[in-house]
Image (cartoon, grey):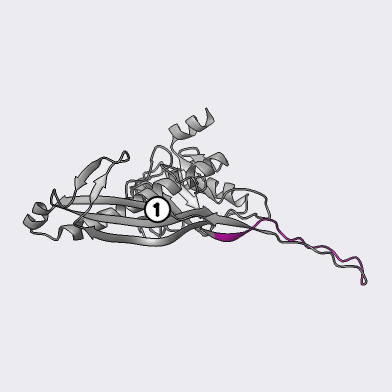
Amino acid sequence: VAKQPVLASLPDAYWINGRSGLMETSDADWKDLTITAEDLGVIVPIPNTLLDDVNVPLWDQVKPLLSEAIGKKVDEAALFGVDKPESWPDAVIPAAVAKGNTVAIGTNADLGADVAKLGELMAAQGFGINGFASRPGMQWKLIGLRDKDDHPIYTQSLANRPESGLYGFPLNEVENGSWDATAAEILALDWRKFVVGIRSDITYDVYREGVISNAEGKVILNLMQQRHTALVVTARVGFQVANSLTRLGEGYPAGVITPKAAAKAAKA
């Protein structure tokens, strides 16, 4: 468990009345946000006969897939609230929707105008966008958009080059399977307000002896007797949102371009 200070109230300035006027005081209060590291893990048992017979380094192929699986789990919890640990705050996309920071895709003239409207909503709360996340394929959707004369809407500097992202900010397509396209098309954020704390990075341990049991204590697999080797993968990760006050009041440092169906469901 760690704590991060976040600004809870803003200081004010005052006019000094005349040459001998008294200067007033102002407070800038801080509160602590708690970040709790939660455990992630999985056991992958493989028969020894398979390990002996394959002609490739099997563990070397499995490890990247397990790292991706852990990243997927973190993204699902932090972005969408799927299987979220209780110690973590509300997931980013549901929290942004609850604050009303949404624009349904197609509401304005084109997707670029939708994003601009979302930026306006966030700016009115004192937050600036410095990056985007999206469903897979969003870059291609941007490239394919055309105006009424069949001309590309986005210039190369805006959409056609992945390193340029969207309106000059990075656009990260989430490709690990965690993105729920029924809930969001694009997520716009002030990334500085979102904190991922890694207490323990992904570790891999190999076991050739031991038993694997279910929640009731029943033995599912005896590694020695059944000639298996198990790879145990663990990580400890925390997440928190540093939603500081701004001069424009309370808000939320993220906004969502939603599918039309999701926008209708939210209103209902």
The total of numbered circles placed on residues is 1
199 and 222: which is toward the camera: 222
**In this rendering, does residue 113 appear at all?**
no
Q: Is residue 224 magenta?
A: no
Q: Position of residue 86 (x, y in %)?
A: 48, 45
Q: Position of residue 163 (x, y in %)?
A: 37, 61
Q: Is residue 15 magenta?
A: yes
74 and 267: which is toward the camera: 74
Residue at image x 43%, y 61%?
199
Q: Position of residue 10 (x, y in %)?
A: 71, 58
Q: Position of residue 36 (x, y in %)?
A: 49, 54
Q: Residue flagged by tag 1: what amino acid is it?
A: Asp
**Is 41 on the left-hand or right-hand side of 87?**
left
Residue at image x 42%, y 51%?
133
Q: Residue furthest top?
A: 268
Residue at image x 39%, y 53%?
39
**Is 34 on the left-hand or right-hand side of 48?**
right
Q: Which residue is mark 1?
A: 39
Q: Main secondary structure of the magenta part?
A: loop
For residue 261, above or below residue 113: above
Q: Tag 1, which secondary structure?
A: strand
**Is 103 on the left-hand or right-hand side of 206?**
right
Start-end of magenta stretch: 3-19
